Image (cartoon, rainbow, N blue to C red):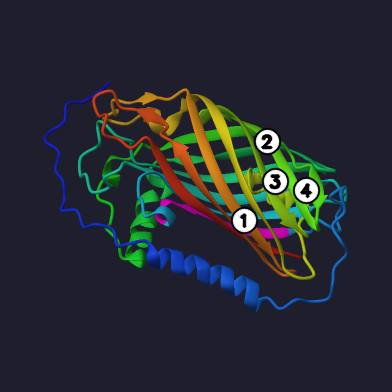
Amino acid sequence: MRRPHGPVTIAPVRHRPESGRHAFGFLACVAFLCAATAPASASPPASASGSAASTPNVFTLRFDNDTFAGLDRWYSSHLAAHLTLQTRVPELQLRFGLGQVLYTPRNIQFVDAPTRDHAFGAWLFADLEALWRTGVHHVSLGLRAGVVGPAAGGEPVQDAMHRVLGVRRPQGWANQLPNQAAFVVAPAWAAAPTRTIGGLDLFFVGAARADLGNAFGRVRAGAGVGLSFGVNAGARIALLEARFVAGHRCPRLCGAVFVGGSIDGVWRDLFVEADGAEVVPNLERRAWVAAFRFGFVLHRRRAWVRYSHVRQTRTFDAPDAPFHPRSHHWGSLTVGVPW
């Protein structure tokens, strides 16, 4: 039930500096990976079957943030660390991880709860996933479970991040979604058939996934095309579907570039619907959400980096606030260390 609220208090807004510093930091990461990881002895070539020799264990760090686009709203941040372990069954890997996702309104300096914009919300979660790889086909079944609300630590994390970046600090986390359990069960499939042309692999990616739970109810279908040299199917697939990030060693520099898109059918979004909030924003969840993305992956024997840039249509409509932008975009950076 909605409660009446008083006048909105807005703290003075300091405009974010240009995103050049963030682009510089990102390029520095790529340069470090390419130059500092000296090539070691050659490893066996990747097999089409995705055997243990071509898919070693891998530790990954993922950072999604709209600061890559000079923005700060809605799907604002995703931090996660994952450990993917090869089992005795060559086709099977197990993936474990911890992460946090932050959602915010457009103006993070509103002191009162936003009534015509996305609510503040944070999700602290653990991942458990099984991945099965056969040839160019990958399937997985995962469980993501955790807590939404102040216990998820969204306010201190975003505040610390903004201190480091030297940009405006959030003011509205006092009105975030309340503590509650959240989970999704996530089956997924992807494939990346290739055709070699002039020493390069022209590859096509198709993917489908579902998130089924009280946090999200949605299904996704996506497709894309790209060029690669020396990387395996897992690395190519990961440009469209990040959950299929795979271990891979290149004896020298190898990589891929990619462009693609996806569409989601959505019937549940805890963060747009603001379950349990004292002031529920006057929003309507969109039933269809489309996304366009492009990206690249660069590999060396000892480490790799993957970056994709995503532009996605807005996840909600605000009937009495038509001034919202139609889309949002952000960058997704993942660094992996196989062994």
Please report the bounds of the magenta region as a residue range.
58-67
Give coordinates of residue 246: x percent, y percent.
72, 53
Q: Which residue is mark 3?
A: 237
Q: CA distance from mark 4 to mark 3?
A: 16 Å
Q: Is residue 199 above or below residue 31?
A: above
Q: Earlier in the sequence, mark 1 or mark 4?
A: 4
Q: Which residue is mark 2?
A: 207
Q: Which residue is mark 1?
A: 296
The answer to whether mark 4 and mark 3 are in CB contact below 8 A is: no
Q: CA distance from mark 2 to mark 1?
A: 17 Å
Return the residue nearer the eye: 166 or 213: 166
The answer to whether mark 4 and mark 2 are in CB contact below 8 A is: no
Q: Dot 4: few (<14), some (14–19), or many (≥20) neighbours within 10 Å? A: many
- Residue at 33%, 36% in the rendered image: 118
Residue 275 visible? The answer is: no
Q: CA distance from mark 4 to mark 2?
A: 19 Å
Tell me: 90 left or right of 25: right
Q: Quadrant of the N terminus?
A: top left
- Residue at 85%, 46% in the rendered image: 91
Q: Dot 2: few (<14), some (14–19), or many (≥20) neighbours within 10 Å? A: many
The answer to whether mark 3 and mark 2 are in CB contact below 8 A is: yes
Give coordinates of residue 116: x percent, y percent.
26, 31
The answer to whether mark 2 and mark 1 are in CB contact below 8 A is: no
Residue furthest to the front in view is 198
Q: Which residue is mark 4?
A: 93
